[in-house]
Image (cartoon, rainbow, N blue to C red):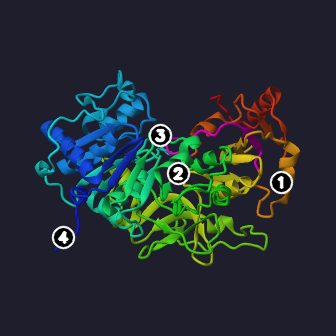
Amino acid sequence: MTSAPATVADLVLGRADDGGVGLMAGDNRWSWSEVVEHSARVERWLEARRAPGPFHIGVLLGNTPTYLFTLFGAALAGASVVGINSTRRGSELARDIRHTDCQMVLTDGAHAHLLDGLDLGDIGVARVDEDGWPGEPSVSSANRGSGAGADDLFVLIFTSGSTGAPKAVRMTHRRAVTMATGSTWLGHDDVLYSAMPLFHGNALNAIVLPALASGAAIALRPRFSASEFMPDVRGYGATFFSTVGRALSYVLATPESPVDRQHHVKFALAPEASPADVRAFRKRFGIACFGGYGSSENAIIMMPVTGMPPDALGIAQEGTDAAIVDAQTRQELPAARFDDAGRMLNPAEAIGELVGRNVADRFEGYYNNPEADAERTRNGWYWSGDLGYRDENGIFFFAGRSGEWLRVDAENFATAPVERILGRYPPVRGAAVYAVPDERTADDQVMAAFELRDGESFDPQAFAAFLDEQGDMSPKWAPRYVRITTLPVGATNKIDKKPLRAGRWYTDDPLFWRSEPGGAYRSFTAADREALEARFQEHGRTIDRP
């Protein structure tokens, strides 16, 4: 009787005699047995270059077969892969590499220039390509030299760094195997399409690891492309894909085609997609997309349930004691209540931080960051850092990040419910809501950045009329400032609000505002900016230009 796999190396070796298609990239195909052969080459190459200290291998590559061979080869060698975010630059990129104690960084011609001139200390850099691994591809020689165990480190995954420097999340072989074997719906004939970066947990947990365990094929795209997304899905015969952030919106912006519904996709994951985009995607392509909830730390997982509202996260995974609590008192907050128009009646008392009261042991920690570990696991609970609320049926909703509270006229509220309402405005493709300073008090004012659909323009009067029609829009939630821009996104298409918050009203983008609450929206001019700055001074408040 074959024992259950305990490590990713066990899963890799379990595919050694599998002649089915394991990997597709462009016009190239590899069987799973060939994937294992290539990975064994990487194993021997790494073993020959191992130095004292943590066996950490930085990987700065695109979504290429080399990345997968390195990931699996490192598992065979007992090394740990550090997924380097290729959108990081300069000293911040160097900091990521040094912080995670990489022995070397593997890169290619497309990314090597990012390391030029960086202070990496004694960390070596090696250029690799598809044929860059010496040695005979004999699987029998794969010896998993250091004998990695279930509790040893498999990968380090950087968080997005939306608050402070990115943290490196530990994923052991045990957790990786759990993620790999949890997708019981997968079969050997499935094809999982990945355009999300392999250094991100979404691609690893939703695509790579489940395919490795089930024998399904992985179809790789070097980087996300909206125009090539559905042609790829059709061309590879994909039965599943996973996206993050605004990816659905970008695909929906491509021209409609008679072949839009000619595909084999059973369903898809699209965490953080807007409810409007999820509905539009199903209508156009016939694909049901589910959001759910997870994170790089993966301690709390939400599962979709039949009949839940389209903007809900779902219910907590079986065995998880999830709650919405006040971060100061640790008291569980009451369920959200809604009126007949769907307006939340008690946001101030219902929105709090999402915690897991029995899952702190699932969090495997951040690498070399005990302060962040302690913050995440205070008082024996796992604190997600995300705001949320739940309804009377126990269904959870996302309300923003813990730093995304706004306080307007003494009322506290979170950004995500406001963004969901603004996302209904027909000309808007994407919306981001954030706080900017009030010129009179220490309170905030609401600013919204809109990315418009192709061919659309912003009509101040029509927007004001739209707000008046939204029964669930609190008057204090209505944005005072509206910026028309291209929303900045990170490597996984998540909106990055940092440059928006920093820019405030100092922008060359079209900007509109209400000079008084409830007034008409009009263009924000240079004269308005000067007058606003003067009012800050009148009230003894300072405002620095970015």
Can residue 264 be seen here? Answer: yes
Q: Position of residue 389 (x, y in %)?
A: 60, 67
Amino acid tagged 1:
Phe
Q: Image height check: is 289 above or below 489?
A: below
Residue at mark 2: 234
* Image disc number at residue 3: 4
What amino acid is labelled 2 in the image?
Arg
The vertical placement of 259 against 114, above or below, is below
Disc 2/disc 1 C-alpha distance (Å): 38 Å
Camera-side residue of 391 and 539: 391
Dot 4 or dot 3, earlier in sequence: 4
- Badge 2: residue crowd in 10 Å (few <14, some 14–19, many ≥20): some
| Residue under label 1 | 466
- For mark 2, give the secondary structure: helix
Q: Nearer the viewer, mark 2 or mark 1?
A: 2
Q: Main secondary structure of the magenta part?
A: loop
The Cα atoms of the two marked residues, 1 and 3, are separated by 37 Å
Circle 4 SS class? loop
Residue stretch rendered in magenta on the structure: 479-494
